[in-house]
Every structure is written in structure tokens, then in C-alpha cells.
Amino acid sequence: MPITKQQLLQILPNAGKQAGVFASALNLAMDRFQINTRMRVAAFIAQVGHESGQFRYVRELGGDQYLSKYDTGPLAKRLGNTPEADGDGQTYRGRGLIQITGHDNYLACSKALFSDDRLLRTPELLEQAEWAAKSAAWFWHSRNLNALADAGDFVGVTRRINGGTNGMVERHSFYSTALKVLA
């Protein structure tokens, strides 16, 4: 079930010209990872729409102080970053439409998309539309989110992506609109 630029704009009205930039990239990514039913596409577009600020951000915002949480301490360790204050929090900041974050997630994503570790050397690839979309679809697939989308468990999808229900009002609004637009 491909999605058009016009449908994206109906779902994510502030996406502007980025809807055109991402339409084909999303279709390729969704096809590769079987995000191919109305329920799956609606949930996926709602989530990536929220996570990326309606396609405006493919790189996590924040300066060194904010990103230091990924550089040292328990979160850094959980993400596979080194325990030293060496800048890997900045290097492996959130990127892509679902914000792949941390050394271990970059490595797993890289192996899935490229069969090598190139994202560790060139993490900026996830800022390009093709890889921003494919990394989001890989993340979706790797967390078995199609099953939750099929069951209509949008809160469960949100929890697996966000770790909680941050931004739920906007996410749900996008989801409800997507279900109507894709009917």
C-alpha cells in the first residue's frame, strides 16, 4: 500500500515540501519491511511524523550538554556507547525518522541495511531521506511493530518506540487522520 505526497500532506500538514522528499523513500522502506496494510502504514506514518517533527528533523536536536547523557552514565552504557567522555554521545545521537540512537543501535541498523558497519563510520547517512526512512522501517520491523499495528495497539507501538507515551495526543491525531486518509 504505497502512500502519496498528497496523502502525507493530509496526515502531516506541516510537512510541506518534505512530504515530496520523503514519499518515495517511505514507499521503498515500507515495502522492504512489510509495512503494507492500512493499519501498519497509518501507525508507521503517525509515529515517524511525530518523531521527526513532520519530516523536519532527521537529526536529534541538542548541544553537547544535552547529548552528554548518551556519552557517559547508565543510558550511554545501555546504548553501547563507551563509558568515557569521548564524544560518542554526539556521534551516535538520534538520527533518521525514528531517531536511531547509540552505538549498538547504529551497528545493528547498519548490519541490517548494509551488511557491514558503515553507519559507525558515517552516521550522517541516516540524515538522508532514503536511509532516514529505511532506518525507521528497520527499527519498526526489528521491534515487531507490525504485529502491534495489526492488533490496533497504537499505545503499545508508541511505548516500543518512545519508551513511554510522550507526545501521545499528536501521535494519535496523526494516526486517526491516517486511518481516514488511507481508507
Image (cartoon, rainbow, N blue to C red):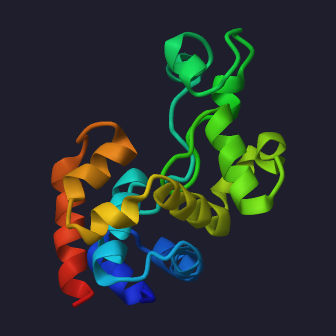
**Residue 136 % position (x, y):** 52, 59
In this rendering, would 72 be left or right of 162?
right
Q: Can you say whether 13 is above or below 80 in the image?
A: below
Left or right relative to 161: residue 116: right
Q: Measuring 20% from the left and 49% from the top, which residue is drawn there?
A: 168
Left or right: 96 as drawn, with respect to 37: right
Q: Quadrant of the C terminus?
A: bottom left
Residue at the image position 35 percent from the left and 59 percent from the top: 47
x, y percent for residue 26: 52, 75
Indicate whether 52 appears above or below 42: above
Please tell me which residue lies in front, 53 or 181.
181
- The structure residue drawn at horizontal position 35% and vertical position 83%, both measured from the top left corner, is 37
Relative to residue 97, is residue 183 drawn left or right?
A: left
**Quadrant showing the N terminus:** bottom left
Q: Nearer the viewer, residue 89 or 37?
A: 37
Tally of numbered tags:
0
Q: Residue at image x 58%, y 28%?
A: 79
- Give how far across and how far down residue 121 sits, in percent: 84, 42
Q: Is residue 113 above or below residue 20?
A: above
144 and 79: which one is in front?
144
Q: Quadrant of residue 86?
A: top right
Q: Is residue 149 above or below residue 72?
A: below
Residue 103 is drawn in which quadrant? Answer: top right
